[in-house]
Image (cartoon, rainbow, N blue to C red):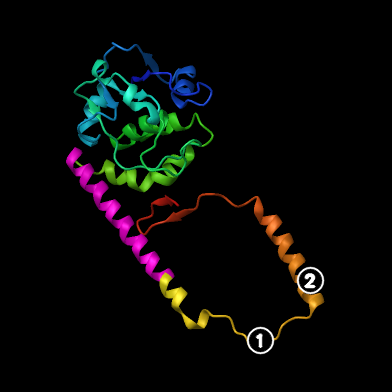
Amino acid sequence: MPVAMWDFHHCDPKRCSGVKLARTNMLKTLKLNQRFRGIVASPVGEKAVSPADRRIVEMYGACVVDCSWARVDEVPFSKIRGPTDRLLPYLVATNPVNYGKPWKLNCAEALAAIFYITGFPEHGEALMGKFKWGHAFSKVNGALLERYAQCTDSADVVREQNEYLKELEQEDEERRREQEDEDDDPLLFRNTNRDYPSSSEEEESEEEDSEDEDDSEGDRSSTEEIQDKLGNTRIR
């Protein structure tokens, strides 16, 4: 099944997922004026990729526009625009550069998403398997990708996306209210009548706490994975 990309050399070749796939013969690099008949993940697409695109992917494959999100305005889309350009629905990036950021997929993730949604998960897994972090993509987005794969067309995918985003908002609101309730709970206030330890006990306790903090320092991360009610892993 053909896999390709237009490379505008915005990224560091050593860190670019598209370049790595090209080096491992997983995709073909296209010239600027070269056309591609398969589904293209592009920010100028007019509708979302969906299972309705399965036949096109099966016959002609998938392609991506490899450019920097910060320099997307510099891309001459007029020279590569086609009727099979597609937008990707809401998904969370798991690559090292944009880990945890919605919509910010890299080339490999975008191509994998096309294959997952159109019913070729084995091709998506093959692409992700070329990266040490690749397994995280299906772990974080797996349940949502399955929901998209069960849709009928682009409009259905967009509805599913918006429903999921609404569910996220509701869960965040519930979590916020629960936190407020905990903060207002008088039983959680400190009991000033308890016995205080001696100064030697305090020093010993402080040393133990300090050691615990040092031991846990390496396990801390700037992101947190939580699971919503539908089984989707979310990044916070």
- Nearer the observer, 32 or 114: 32
The amino acid sitting under disc 2 is: Glu
Residue 136 lies, in percent from the top left, at: 47, 41
Residue 110, numbered circle: none
The amino acid sitting under disc 1 is: Arg
Q: Is residue 111 above or below residue 1?
A: below
State the residue at coordinates (60%, 52%).
Answer: 220
- Circle 1 crowding by C-alpha within 10 Å: few under 14, some 14–19, many from 20: few
State the residue at coordinates (49%, 17%).
Answer: 23
- Circle 2 crowding by C-alpha within 10 Å: few under 14, some 14–19, many from 20: few
Helix, strand or loop at label 2? It is helix
Marks 1 and 2 sit apart, C-alpha to C-alpha, by 18 Å
Residue 123: tell me if it is visible: no
State the residue at coordinates (82%, 75%).
Answer: 200
Residue 105 lies, in percent from the top left, at: 39, 35
Mark 2 or mark 1, which is nearer the start of the sequence? Answer: 1
Q: As drawn, is 167 to the left or to the right of 67?
A: left
The quadrant the N terminus occupies is top left
- Residue 50: image quadrant is top left
Prevailing secondary structure class for the magenta stretch in the rendered image: helix
- Nearer the observer, 212 or 140: 212
Number of marks: 2
Residue 169 lies, in percent from the top left, at: 32, 57
Q: Which residue is mark 2?
A: 203
Residue 186 lies, in percent from the top left, at: 48, 83
Numbered range of the magenta stretch? 154-179
Q: Which residue is mark 1?
A: 194
- Nearer the observer, 30 or 130: 30
Residue 140 sits inside the magenta stretch: no
